[in-house]
Image: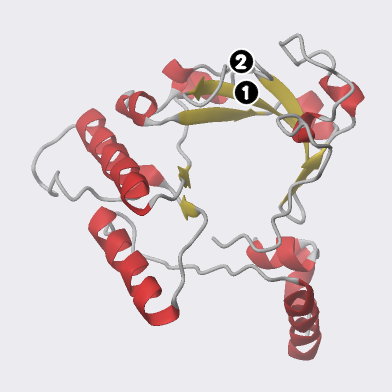
């Protein structure tokens, strides 16, 4: 997915790239990109916050690398440093413990951590997902500072779009832009801004519609620069 997104090539075409073509495209990206991405893989249900802390410390010492953002894929299949395997803990306790430990790690290193979870069976086919549709443990939304749902339907898939709905927001009023539409290029695993017309029936707030959705929050008229963003 990362290669397809970065190289802007459909996933089905990646195997057809020769090593020479791949290297040339990577070199071009390196010339115009200042950010850095480090990927670390752990066996399922084996890594907990202690492993992540050690990795962050090791990257800082050996590579002078401090991430601007951490993605955990995904929270429910991590392990807990406090709840040991075989302890008989239920899913509510286990997932809540993992969420609390990761939130503590984010505070400790002053870095945002984003992860994903799934919905319940009833929420899977819903076009209006709520916090109560979180699977396995309601302790997760109780711990998270910000949560949003990605909602799709047959009609949205035909338009290559999905709806983003804010479920919880401790940083701002969650009713501001509670729902908005984004475009999806699934072949290249890309998200992109939709035209303002696509937002009109979804935005649930009285705001200045003359400002593009993804630029609201800045009042200086400038675009955000993520060229040196490290993950």
Q: Residue at x 57, y 28 (%)?
A: 149
The residue lying toward the viewer, choosing from 36 and 125, is: 36
Q: Quadrant of the N terminus?
A: bottom right
Q: Position of residue 168 (x, y in %)?
A: 49, 22
Point out the frontmost of discs 2 and 1: 1
Q: Residue at x 58, y 23 (%)?
A: 166
Seen in the image, is 33 located left or right of residue 221?
left
Spatial separation of the CA atoms under disc 2 and disc 1: 8 Å
The residue beneath circle 1 is: 165
Q: Position of residue 20 (x, y in %)?
A: 78, 90
Q: Position of residue 214 (x, y in %)?
A: 76, 35
Q: Position of residue 21 (x, y in %)?
A: 81, 85
Q: Residue furthest bottom?
A: 20
Q: Residue at x 32, y 60 (%)?
A: 52
Q: How many marks?
A: 2
The residue beneath circle 2 is: 128
State whether residue 14 is above or below residue 180. Answer: below
State whether residue 99 is above or below residue 142. Answer: below
Q: Residue at x 12, y 48 (%)?
A: 84
In contact (CB < 8 Å): disc 2 and disc 1: yes
Counting residues from the start of the chain, the first of labels 2 and 1 encountered is 2
Quadrant of the rendered image containing residue 41: bottom left
State whether residue 63 is above or below residue 137. Answer: below
């Amino acid at each position: 997915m990362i290669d397809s997104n970065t190289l802007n090539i459909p996933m089905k075409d990646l195997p057809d790239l020769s090593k020479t073509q791949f290297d040339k495209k990577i070199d071009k990206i390196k010339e115009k990109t200042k950010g850095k991405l480090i990927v670390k893989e752990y066996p399922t249900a084996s890594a907990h916050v202690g492993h992540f802390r050690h990795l962050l410390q090791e990257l800082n010492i050996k590579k002078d690398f401090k991430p601007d953002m951490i993605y955990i894929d995904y929270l429910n299949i991590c392990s807990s440093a406090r709840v040991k395997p075989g302890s008989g803990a239920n899913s509510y306790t286990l997932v809540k413990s993992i969420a609390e430990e990761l939130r503590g790690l984010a505070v400790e290193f002053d870095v945002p951590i984003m992860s994903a979870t799934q919905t319940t069976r009833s929420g899977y086919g819903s076009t209006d997902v709520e916090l109560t549709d979180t699977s396995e443990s309601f302790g997760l939304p109780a711990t998270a500072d910000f949560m949003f749902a990605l909602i799709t339907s047959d009609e949205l898939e035909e338009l290559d779009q999905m709806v983003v709905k804010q479920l919880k927001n401790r940083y701002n009023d969650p009713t501001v832009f509670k729902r908005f539409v984004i475009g999806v290029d699934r072949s290249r695993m890309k998200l992109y801004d939709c035209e303002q017309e696509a937002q009109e029936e979804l935005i649930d707030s009285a705001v200045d519609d003359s400002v593009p959705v993804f630029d609201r929050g800045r009042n200086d008229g400038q675009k955000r620069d993520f060229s040196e963003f490290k993950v």
